[in-house]
Amino acid sequence: MQARICRPFALMGGIMLSIDDRGQVVSSRVRLALRSGIERGDLPVVHAVVVHQTGSSTAASTLSSYDRPGSSGAHFLIDKDGTIFQTASLYRKTHHVGQIKSRCLAERSCAPAELQALRGKRVGSGIGRVESRKEYPRRYPANSDSIGIEVVSQAPNNVFEPLTDAQQTSLQWLLTELLHTLRLARTDVYRHSEISWKQPSEASSAKW
C-alpha cells in the first residue's frame, strides 16, 4: 500500500478539512489547544487513526497532564460535551500508541518467517520491535504513521465509561473528515486496545 503523504493536504471543493501549513485544522468545530511538549518529530505519512480514552474525568485534567515534561498525548481530545480540541500538529508525531501487538498473530496469518521472528519474544517491546520493522498494513499502525484521538472518559473499576452521545457525534464527524482528507478507509481506524496491550474496554463503545 502506498504511503499517504500528510503534507500538503490538497483540498477538493471545500469538502476536505482545511489544514494550514503548521498542521492546524481550521474549523469552527475544532478548538486549538496545542501542546508542543507532546510532539515528537515529523510525521511524514499517515496510514491510520487510533481512538483512545483518557481515564480522566475532564479535558482540563488531560490538557494539564500534557504540559508535564516528557508527557505522551494524542493529536485530538474530545470532551464529554463533544468539544473537539486539537492538541498537536498533524505534521508531528506523538507517542499515543506504545508497543504494538503482532497483527499476523491476531489474524492467524503469520508466514513461517514471521513466526520464527516472533518466537520467544516477550509481550510489549519484544514483539513491538519485531512488528515495527514491517510495513503497514502487514503490521498495526504505530506512532510513526498514525493520528491519535483521545476521548475523555473515566475508568471506574478499570472499565472505561461509554462515550456520551455528544462525544460519539463529534468523533464520527472528525473521523469522517480525517479519512476523506487523508484518503483512508474505515478499516484504517483502530481502537487502542486492538493494537496494543491496553484495557479491552478502551474505546469499545466508539462507533464509526
Image: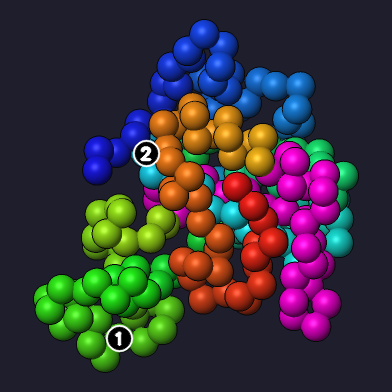
Q: Is residue 192 above or below residue 42?
A: below
Q: Which residue is mark 1?
A: 121
Please give the range of residues in magenta. Answer: 143-171
In the rendered structure, find residue 154 and report the number of the disc placed on it: none
**Residue 117 at x, y percent in the picture:** 19, 79
**Residue 85 at x, y percent in the picture:** 74, 38
Q: Is residue 94 visible?
A: no
In the rendered structure, find residue 45 and report the number of the disc placed on it: 2
Please report the residue visible at 77 percent of the width from the left and 57 percent of the height from the top: 163
Residue 78 magenta-drawn? no
Direction left: furthest residue: 113
SS category of the residue bearing label 2? loop
SS category of the residue bearing label 1? loop
**Circle 1 residues within 10 Å: few <14, some 14–19, many ≥20:** some
**Residue 39 at x, y percent in the picture:** 55, 46
Please report the residue visible at 63 percent of the width from the left and 58 percent of the height from the top: 52
Give the amino acid type for the residue marked by disc 2 in the picture: Val
